[in-house]
Amino acid sequence: MLTSLPDLDSLPSQTATQVKNKWSETVRMVQRNGSVAVTNHATVEMVLLAAETYQRMAAEIEQLKAREAGKLDELSQRFDANLASLQQPQATDRLSNLFAAKGKLTARPKAGGSY
């Protein structure tokens, strides 16, 4: 399950000067809230995260990458199988017959899973 991230504007914030001068206070704020926005001239420039939050997010990204790689492998295998079937010697004849049918239905078309 993906971690939902709060909007930058809703995060507790400190200026870069406050972070520099009151580091221990910033650390406590991060531990209490999970993250703190660091601003410079009223613009959020970075977000400090607790190490636990960072590790959780990194693990979620790795899981997503693995799932994506699995899906891409599956699609690649299906593509290769379809390509191999199109490269068979009889594929040209089958496709020619298919295009020659020109709208002749041999069976009633079925639409959807429940048809």
Image (cartoon, helix red, strand yellow):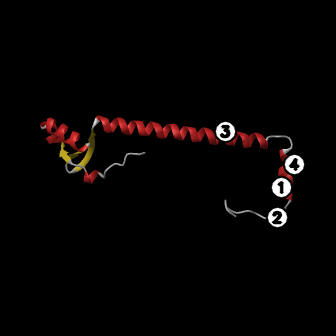
- Looking at the image, which residue sits at the far left? 21
Quadrant of image for the N terminus: top left
Residue drawn at 85 percent across, 41 percent down: 89
**Earlier-in-chain disc, 3 versus 2:** 3
Residue 77 at x, y = what percent? Answer: 67, 39
Q: Which mark is residue 77?
A: 3
When asked about the image quadrant of residue 45, the answer is top left
Residue 17 at x, y = what percent? Answer: 15, 41
Question: How far apart are the alpha carbons under marks 3 and 2?
Answer: 31 Å
Q: Which mark is residue 98?
A: 1
Question: How far apart are the alpha carbons under marks 2 and 1?
Answer: 9 Å
Q: Provide the secondary structure element on which disc 1 rests.
A: helix
Residue 85 at x, y = what percent? Answer: 78, 42
**Earlier-in-chain disc, 3 versus 4:** 3
Residue drawn at 43 percent across, 39 percent down: 61
Q: Provide the secondary structure element on which disc 3 rests.
A: helix
